[in-house]
Image (cartoon, rainbow, N blue to C red):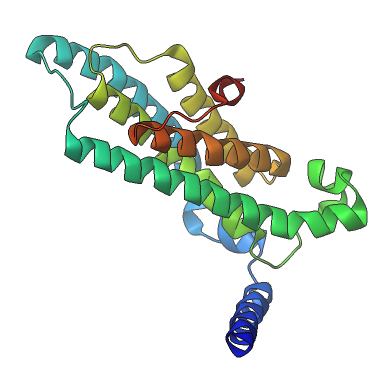
């Protein structure tokens, strides 16, 4: 058991050394790609939002015309919902850990202002995995739009709540421009991924017919 434990420790240390040696800068991800210097930088997020809102409106009309009853209670759909929410919970947790791993040492050395305001560009000049997680977070806001589709497929007769589509559209635009204009949004990313880790875990458990406590705190 001792040898096996030492073996796992060595593997973990090797993986950590490899991770720490990765050299990826802000410019590598968000500046060097040619399309980020074109109008596509603005066309992509706004066209996505327009299509998203249009589909919400069009789908409500189609449901009334076709009499679609939804997939609530269907085993295949329920299993997909379990996997979907589980995936987003784990993905949010991974982004949270990755971001904190990079930023906590900076905060300990330079103070919270270095994260909140990025005074002197301390974070933007760093060559590590931070901006890989920032990129994952930014693009995940597009993936999360699928949540609304799943709500529509599960309960087609219910209207999409204002908070649902308002949250998804504003967060997508905010995250996109904070990222691509190099503004410090690390605190927001940590808060959002932390909440989503538990939020999607809660949804997964509900699909499993498990009712965890603390729903009111999650809502707040």
**Looking at this rendering, what residue extends furthest in the bottom direction?**
3
Q: Quadrant of the C terminus?
A: top right
Q: Is residue 165 visible?
A: yes
Q: Residue at x 71, y 59 (%)?
A: 101
Identity of the residue drawn at 66% across and 53% down:
99
Q: Quadrant of residue 217?
A: top right
The percent coordinates of residue 51 (x first, y second) are 33, 27
Q: Nearer the viewer, residue 151 or 119?
A: 151
Q: Position of residue 129 (x, y in %)?
A: 64, 64
Q: In front: 215, or 34?
A: 215
Rendering quarter of residue 53: top left
Outermost residue toward the right? Answer: 110
Q: Quadrant of the N terminus?
A: bottom right
Q: Nearer the viewer, residue 151 or 37?
A: 151
Camera sees residue 37: no
Look at the picture and state if 57 lies above or below 71: above
Give me the residue at 60% from left, 87% from top: 7
Residue 189 is situated, as x and y percent measured from the top left of the image, at 64, 42
Q: Position of residue 215 (x, y in %)?
A: 53, 23
Residue at 12 percent across and 18 percent down: it is 68
Answer above or below: position of 149 versus 44.
Answer: above
**Left or right placement of residue 113 versus residue 88 in this view:** right
């Amino acid at each position: 058991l001792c040898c096996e434990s030492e073996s796992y420790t060595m593997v973990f240390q090797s993986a950590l050394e490899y991770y720490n040696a990765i050299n990826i800068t802000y410019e590598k991800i968000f500046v060097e790609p040619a399309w980020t210097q074109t109008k596509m930088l603005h066309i992509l997020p706004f066209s996505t939002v327009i299509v998203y809102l249009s589909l919400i409106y069009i789908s409500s009309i189609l449901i009334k015309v076709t009499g679609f009853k939804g997939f609530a209670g269907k085993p295949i759909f329920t299993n997909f919902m379990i996997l979907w929410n589980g995936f987003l919970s784990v993905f949010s947790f991974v982004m949270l850990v990755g971001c904190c791993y990079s930023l906590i040492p900076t905060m300990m050395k330079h103070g919270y202002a270095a994260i909140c305001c990025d005074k002197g560009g301390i974070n933007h000049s760093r060559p590590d995995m931070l901006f890989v997680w920032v990129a994952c977070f930014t693009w995940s806001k597009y993936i999360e739009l699928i949540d609304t589709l799943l709500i529509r497929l599960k309960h087609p007769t219910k209207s999409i709540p204002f908070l649902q589509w308002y949250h998804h559209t504003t967060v997508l635009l905010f995250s996109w421009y904070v990222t691509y204009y190099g503004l410090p949004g690390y605190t927001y990313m940590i808060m959002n991924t932390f909440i989503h880790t538990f939020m999607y875990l809660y949804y997964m458990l509900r699909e499993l017919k498990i009712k965890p406590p603390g729903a009111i705190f999650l809502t707040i």
